[in-house]
Image (cartoon, coloured by chain):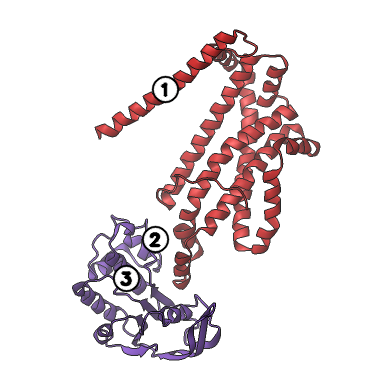
Chain colours: A red, B purple
Amino acid sequence: MKKPYIKQIRSFGERLLVIFFWLLVWELISRRINQVIILPSPLMVADALLQLCQTFDFWKAILFSSLRIIGGFGLGLILGTMLAVAAYNFNIIKLLITPLMKLAQAMPVASFIILALIWIKSKNLSVLTSFMMVMPIIYANIYQGLASADEKLLQMARVFRIGRWRRVKAIYLPAIVPHFVAAISVGVGLCWKAGIAAEVIGIPSGSIGQRLYEAKIYLMTKELFAWTAVIIIISIIFERIVMLLLNLVSKKGSKGAANGHTANQPD
Amino acid sequence: MDIRLINLTKRFGDKTVLDNVNISFAEGRISCLMGPSGRGKTTVANLIMGLIKPDSGTIEGCRGKAIAAVFQEDRLIEHWDAEKNIRLVCDKSVDSEQIREELQKVGINDYKSKAVGSFSGGMCRRVALVRALMARSDIVILDEPFKGLDDAVKMQVIEYLKTKTRGKTVIVITHDRTDAALLNADLITLE
């Protein structure tokens, strides 16, 4: 019992050292350049972040953007799953959906954001953008998972007349979960990147994107770095929460599903 | 009603596996389907189970009947334990105690603690057999059910099979002529 504990501490220590190394590199480069407007030091950014944390607007902006981006993520998750199940069961739906998914994947995010800005209010732009980022990934991976379900087990289920829900639990879920987990992992990162990009272009009032835009306009580089750090932190926290929930669910349905798969793009 | 295969033909690409075959399996009896490898014994089983369709000919006596099977491979959910695998095909009224008793009759005691993926081939075969015999069924199809079993266990399993399938139509695919004798089965040979 003692050894894995020591291993964990060692691995944590190693990670801390790596972070410290890169902070040191950043600090040294910043000192060499010696211009806050181009590259502020890590301490300056930390100070700016601390200042931001003390304002009500900071938390309001986080809430504003998080709600919309997570909302878009949730919608993409639900619709992507529903479409994948429909496409798996009905070939005509698969045929109809495939070009749309390909289009959604190939379209440059910036083009889509500008187009969407014509159709909807800038306030909701990040919802649509993060939805459009997540939905094709979820669709492709759930479909792939369903298609990879063991054909021999499905035949067994047919012969024994095993009911639909038992079939889902025994055969489909274990096949889907690894693909789903990979899709979520990719989707979470993408929805934050694209969602914030949409806010920077649409500049909805009270959003993180607006604050980033203002920081850029007024050359507040420290704040720009601080907001970037905030986005990364929220994205990581959100991903951890989703993965935790997924692990809880997948533990019930299947074992060891949450590892080592690469997310697929739609075919 | 007997299961009757009438003028049955099945091809896979250019290869004709069954050519105008006529077979009858007596209702309520054990029949052993024998023949050299590659003669289409498993194809016959798959046709009766409805997993594949014949190119021509008809199958009578299966419509509306509940079928249970041991497949050529065990087809168990590997990360589930034996009890859970069996429960998957059973009615809700079947309880853990009943499953445990049935598994012990074929010499399986690790029914709940281990995933069947960690079982030996012979143990998986017995779990697959218990699963087939505990499912509600009128017809039982067993494709080489004694594969991987040593002689002592095989005798135990044969006795268990005979008790559990009384009154059912059973088709056993085997290479071993002595299996047919031990099961008091009708012998059908695919030439």
How far apart are labels 1 and 2 at the CA level?
Answer: 42 Å
Side of A100 relative to B152 (left or right): right
Q: Which mark is residue B77?
A: 2
Residue B54 or B97: which is nearer the viewer? B54
How far apart are labels 3 and 1 at the CA level?
Answer: 54 Å
Q: Chain of mark 1?
A: A
What is the residue that sits farthest to the left in this orientation? Answer: B152
Tell me the element at label 3: helix
Circle 2 Cα neighbour tier, 10 Å, few/some/many (<14 / 14–19 / ≥20): many
Q: Which mark is residue A16?
A: 1
The quarter of the picture where the N terminus of chain B appears is bottom left
Given the image, on which type of amino acid does mark 2 rest?
Answer: Ile
The residue beneath circle 3 is: B130
State which quadrant residue A224 falls in: top right
In the image, residue A36 sits, relative to residue A155, either above or below, namely: above
State which quadrant residue B43 falls in: bottom left
- Residue A76's x, y, as percent? 63, 45
On whether disc 3 and disc 2 are found on a single subunit, the reply is: yes
